[in-house]
Image (cartoon, rainbow, N blue to C red):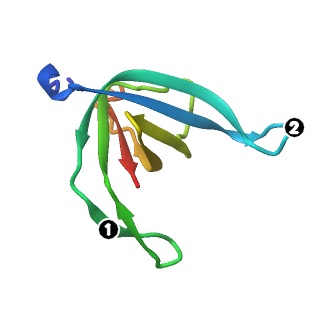
């Protein structure tokens, strides 16, 4: 059993997503792991969340794509999403699962 698929007409915006690997290079910079250019669903509904230190963080929107965008990573931590000349930082990434255990979608919250 799987959840119903999202309609393909929702995924109409071309985005470039760069996810960083955990760890540092010899220069002390995060290791660049994967760059993906694809069509995503961008919901630009801003809202605020509180982090572990009780600070308010303003999130600019949510970026969604069906399936597992980065299957090689156990956890997605940091990255950037670029559309045109605008760049967003990935605050948090979620991968909800179908009842059979497969990944339903990759959802990135942007700030």
The N terminus is located in which quarter?
Answer: top left
Among the 4 quarters of the image, the one containing residue 30: top right
Task: Tell me, yes or no, if residue 71 can be seen here.
Answer: no
Task: Say whether marks 2 and 1 touch (CB < 8 Å).
Answer: no
Which percent across, then down, holds residue 42? 25, 39
Residue at 34 percent of width and 24 percent of height: 67
- Left or right, residue 12 beside residue 9: right
Residue, far bottom = 54
Residue, far front = 85
Q: Earlier in the sequence, mark 2 or mark 1?
A: 2
Read off the residue under disc 1.
Answer: 48
Read off the residue under disc 2.
Answer: 26
- Residue 54 to residue 41: above or below: below
What secondary structure is found at the residue carrying circle 2? loop
- Left or right, residue 17 beside residue 77: left
Residue at 51 percent of width and 72 percent of height: 52
Which percent across, then down, holds residue 78? 56, 45
Q: Residues within 10 Å of mark 1 (few under 14, many from 20)?
A: few
- Residue 44 to residue 20: above or below: below
75 or 54, which is in the foreground? 54
The C terminus is located in which quarter?
Answer: bottom left
What secondary structure is found at the residue carrying circle 1? strand
User: What is the distance, in whole Å, between disc 2 and disc 1 at their CAs?
Assistant: 36 Å
Q: Residues within 10 Å of mark 2 (few under 14, many from 20)?
A: few
103 or 69, which is in the foreground? 69
81 or 72, which is in the foreground? 81
Which percent across, then down, holds residue 48? 32, 68
Which percent across, then down, holds residue 43? 22, 45
- Residue 80 to residue 49: above or below: above
3 or 34, which is in the foreground? 34
């Amino acid at each position: 059993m799987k959840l119903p698929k999202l309609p393909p007409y929702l995924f109409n915006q071309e985005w470039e997503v760069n996810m960083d690997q955990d760890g540092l290079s010899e220069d002390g910079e995060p290791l660049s792991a994967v760059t993906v250019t694809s069509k995503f669903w961008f919901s630009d509904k801003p809202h605020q969340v509180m982090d572990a230190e009780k600070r308010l963080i303003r999130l600019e929107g949510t970026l969604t794509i069906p399936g597992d965008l980065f299957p090689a990573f156990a956890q997605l931590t940091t990255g950037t999403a670029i559309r045109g000349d605008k760049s967003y930082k990935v605050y948090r990434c979620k991968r909800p699962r179908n009842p059979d255990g497969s990944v339903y979608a990759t959802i990135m919250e942007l700030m």
